[in-house]
């Protein structure tokens, strides 16, 4: 049975999902097929990842019923603005080969162009009202971005997907989300951003952390499994990425052990308060030069 989290609009979302950032299009369909066959029922992608079509292919190849899979994707900033975001839904849905998307979220707050962010979110509200999406949300929104969004829009986001792993736990974001009834979904849940190849010399991989390694040894689990368990026990959704079949299976085998309070607290204490990804207030995502192709 799939463990789920109840969203603030009554929709149930699987707590553990599968991420495909940096999964090359030619690897994505097989990875998604493998994940769905291993039991995952949520797939998280983004228009900006360039692999929505292959996510749809993987879904069909898996043989799992479309209605049993929770498809999540993100609108890229070049498609912000009311009409542009309505069209972004059409592009994503058509690339997936589906008529309805389970969760559509804004990829970045884009504080430099917040009027377009508001327009984009109003389009999500319209898509929700029209039944084209089952839930709407945001990503990389800090508490002040959420507050600004709330001033100009009606519907509280169901999910805020943010960087969150033991070295960067964002307690203020988690608190602000909880106060509004927004589910926190962890990207880089096993700390991928702390060890992706080519992302900077001085990164310290959370996978190598001694405290996490010690807890993993006690439970005969891997460091990745311990981190995923830590998120799930604290009520967060997780979307680990892998294109390796063994690791895909391993990352979903996280429901049959339990961390105790001391272990959870020891992992909480590893927070260094330093983000690995771009600061949403400092980096203008329009400078990333990503355009989303028509379907
Ligand atoms: P992650 O899931 O924490 O880590 C992925 C990395 O860990 C990959 O290099 C993967 O390599 C490796 N890996 C996977 N399972 C492993 C295991 N059991 N043991 C050791 N290594 C393992 O990082 P992420 O990809 O950054 O985050 C997950 C998802 O979050 C993304 O795929 C994407 O869907 C989403 N995301 C969203 C944003 C955003 O701005 N909203 C940003 C980044 C990510 P292999 O593939 O070789 O296994």
Image: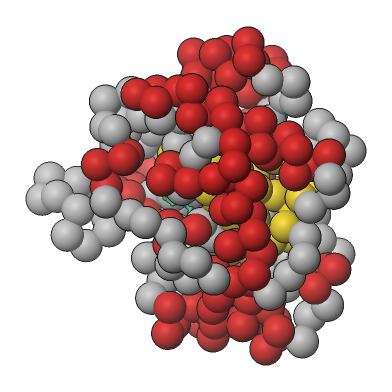
Q: Is residue 248 above or below residue 118?
A: below
The image shows residue 143, relative to residue 91, as above or below, that is above
Residue 208 image point, x, y percent: 30, 53
Residue 132: give x, y in percent of width and height: 79, 52
Location of residue 9 in the rendering, given as x and y in whole percent from the top left corner: 85, 34
Task: Report x, y in % for residue 195.
Answer: 27, 55
Q: Is residue 58 visible?
A: yes
Image quarter for ligand 1? bottom left
> Does 190 sit above or below residue 248?
above
Extreme residue in the right direction? 10
Q: Quadrant of the C terminus?
A: bottom right
For image coordinates 74% across by 20% down, the residue present is: 154
- Please give the name of the residue rendered at 72% of the width and 25% of the height, measured from the top-left corner: 156
User: Which residue is depicted at the point 54% across and 78% down?
Assistant: 54
- Seen as rendered, the residue at the extreme left is 201
Name the quadrant of the N terminus.
Answer: bottom right
**286 relative to 86 in the view: left or right:** left
């Amino acid at each position: 049975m799939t463990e789920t989290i109840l969203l603030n609009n009554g929709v149930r979302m699987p707590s553990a999902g599968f991420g495909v950032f940096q999964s090359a299009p030619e690897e994505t369909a097989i990875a998604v097929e493998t994940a769905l066959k291993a039991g995952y029922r949520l797939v998280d992608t983004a228009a900006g990842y360039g692999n929505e079509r292959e996510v749809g292919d993987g879904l069909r190849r898996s043989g799992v019923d479309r209605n049993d899979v929770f498809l999540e994707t993100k609108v890229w900033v070049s498609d912000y603005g009311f009409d542009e975001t309505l069209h972004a839904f059409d592009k994503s849905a058509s690339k997936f080969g589906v008529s309805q998307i389970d969760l559509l979220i804004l990829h970045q707050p884009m504080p430099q162009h917040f009027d377009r962010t508001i327009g984009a979110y109003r389009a999500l509200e319209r898509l929700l009202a029209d039944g084209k999406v089952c839930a709407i949300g945001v990503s990389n929104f800090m508490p002040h971005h959420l507050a600004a969004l709330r001033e100009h829009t009606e519907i509280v986001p169901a999910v805020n997907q943010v960087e969150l792993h033991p070295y960067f736990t964002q307690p203020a974001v988690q608190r602000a989300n909880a106060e509004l009834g927004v589910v926190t979904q962890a990207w880089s849940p096993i700390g991928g951003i702390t060890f992706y190849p080519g992302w900077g010399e001085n990164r310290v991989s959370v996978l190598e952390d001694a405290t996490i390694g010690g807890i993993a040894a006690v439970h005969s689990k891997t460091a990745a499994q311990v981190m995923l368990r830590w998120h799930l026990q604290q009520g967060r959704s997780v979307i680990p990425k892998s294109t390796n079949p063994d690791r895909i299976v391993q990352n979903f085998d996280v429901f049959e052990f339990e961390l105790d309070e001391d272990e959870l607290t020891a992992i909480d204490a590893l927070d260094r308060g330093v983000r690995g990804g771009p600061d949403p207030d400092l980096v203008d995502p329009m400078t990333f030069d990503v355009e989303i192709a028509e379907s």
